Each structure stands twice: as C-alpha cells, then as structure tokens.
Amino acid sequence: MNNIVLGFNEIVSFIEEHLTDEIDYTELGQLIGYSPYHLQRLFLMLTNTPISEYIRNRRLASAAFDLLAEDSTVTDIAYKYGYSSPTSFNRAFKAFHGVTPKDIKKGEHVIKAYPPLRFELSIKGASPLDYKIVTTKSFRVVGKKIHTTMENSKSYRELPAFWQEVQQTAVIPELLAKMNQAPFGLLGVSDYNPNLDESAFDYYIGVASTLECSTGEAEIVIPEMTWAAFKHPMGTPAELQEFQRQIVMDWLPTSGYEFAFGPDLEVYGEDNSVENWIPVTRVVKK
C-alpha cells in the first residue's frame, strides 16, 4: 500500500489514542517523515480540513458520547478534552453540535457524528500530471485582498464570492494594465500562516508588478522560490480535490521534492486553464 496512505492512517490512529492528551504536531509529522508544516499542507490537500480543526471536531464528537455515557459533569468533560474552562468548552461545543453540553446530557437532542477519517488507496488508470519546475526571483504582487479562514470550509465559500465580486467591476482590467513582470497572468495568492493552529490566511487577486498600489489595493512580496507548477483545466471543487490528491499521492512520493514554506499561486491563462504553483525544495538525502 502507498506509504502515505499507511502513514496518514497511523496519524488518525494516533489522534484517536490521544484525544484527551496534548497532541504534538512534530510527533505526528514523524509518522510520515515530514515536518509539522508539511504535515499540515498534506493533510489539508487530502481532506480540505485543517488538521487542527479535525482534531478539535473529533474531540467534540467524542465529548458528546462521554456526556451521555459517563456520570461526569460538564466541567469534568471540558478539562478532560483540554479546554481551559467550562465556558470555552460550552462555546466550542455549541458551535459544533448546535446545542449545549447540558442539553446533550439530558438526552434531549441528536448528537452530531464526526467519525474518524480513513485513508484508502484508490487504484485507477494512470492520469498524467503536466507540471514544470520553475524558479523565480523575488517579485511583488499588487491587487485586491481578502482575509479568510479554512475553519468550517469558510474559505471555500468566500473565495468564489470574492472572485465574482472582483470580476463584476473594472478591477481586473486595471490590474492587468499594471502587470510588468513575470509570472505573467492574473494571479491568485494564498498566503498561509505557518502556525499550525491558525487557519486564517490572506488571499490576493492581483498581478506581478513594480508599479504603485492604487487606493484600496494591497501588496505582497513573494521571496525567491522554486515551484512545482501543475497545469490543469479549471473545474469543479470536486475535480480540484481529486487533482490535489493526485499531487500528494502520486507525484510527491517519487518526485524528489517536498513542500517548502511559502504562498501558493494560481496563474490564470487565456486558454481557460490554470497553473497551480506549489513551493517546493529538493529532498536532502540522508
């Protein structure tokens, strides 16, 4: 079986065994031979869920069963699952289940299930991945920015709406007129936070440019970077998820590269295609 599949199932098992303990992301990453940052990136690409959110949701689902099965108080359960106070536990519990812990303990409401993940090897006909390795010097992107979060898949709702909002104005022609350096094309930039517990990030729609920002625009400087650039037609969210799975499961293990810390880029072409640029670095053989 694919080593990544085995590794991620080990990660899920480890999480299940330590739901009531503090979980060390470094220790989790060692199960698949990656740093905590790479673990976060791989998990997100495979599941569309930040690993911190997955762990929190598993704890809240397990806490609901404990409230019904045990004679413990709500306060006992709150501390059992690592919450600093019953108040913070109540808030998180209600946000997830839609009801309070006391309501669940009374047995008057349906519990929201959130079963453990299971990663499986999917054997299909080989699908080619068109990619190139690109090295860029530092460049600056100017454009429109939104602050969003991966929590509860919020970014998957907000980013399409953000694109639609920008496309309905004269912003894109104005941005394209400023484009004067590579990479050429309309860009989408996801500037992720290296903190594993922070799922919020900034997203830019812009162009590479040395010109000044106009009123209402923002900028981000992209450092010198090596990228794996994958070209594919624009598709549905489900198709994008399968594309990301293919990168992680099929390309990454044999590529000689690993993910590097840096923003992700989308480079939109005129042929209704998009290149996803993922920051990478050569694997150092030990």
Image: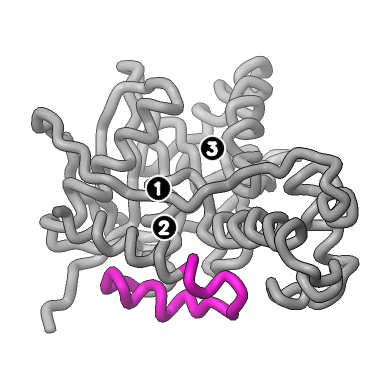
**Residue 19: within the magenta?**
yes
The kind of secondary structure element at disc 1 is: helix
Task: Give me the residue at 73% from left, 48% from top.
Answer: 96
Look at label 2 and name its amino acid: Arg
Q: How is the image coloured?
A: one colour
Residue 55 image point, x, y percent: 57, 61
Q: Which mark is residue 117?
A: none
Q: What residue is pinned by disc 3?
A: 206
Identify which residue, 33 or 221, lies in the foreground: 33
The kind of secondary structure element at disc 2 is: helix
Task: Give me the residue at 35% from left, 17% from top.
Answer: 272
* Residue 169 found in image quarter: top right
Whole-angstrom CA distance, mark 3 to mark 2, is 23 Å
Camera-near label (3 vs 2) is 2
Camera-near label (1 vs 3) is 1
* Residue 43 found in image quarter: bottom left
Look at label 3 and name its amino acid: Gly
Which portion, as a residue range, is magenta? 15-34
Q: What residue is pinned by disc 1?
A: 45
Q: What residue is pinned by disc 2?
A: 41
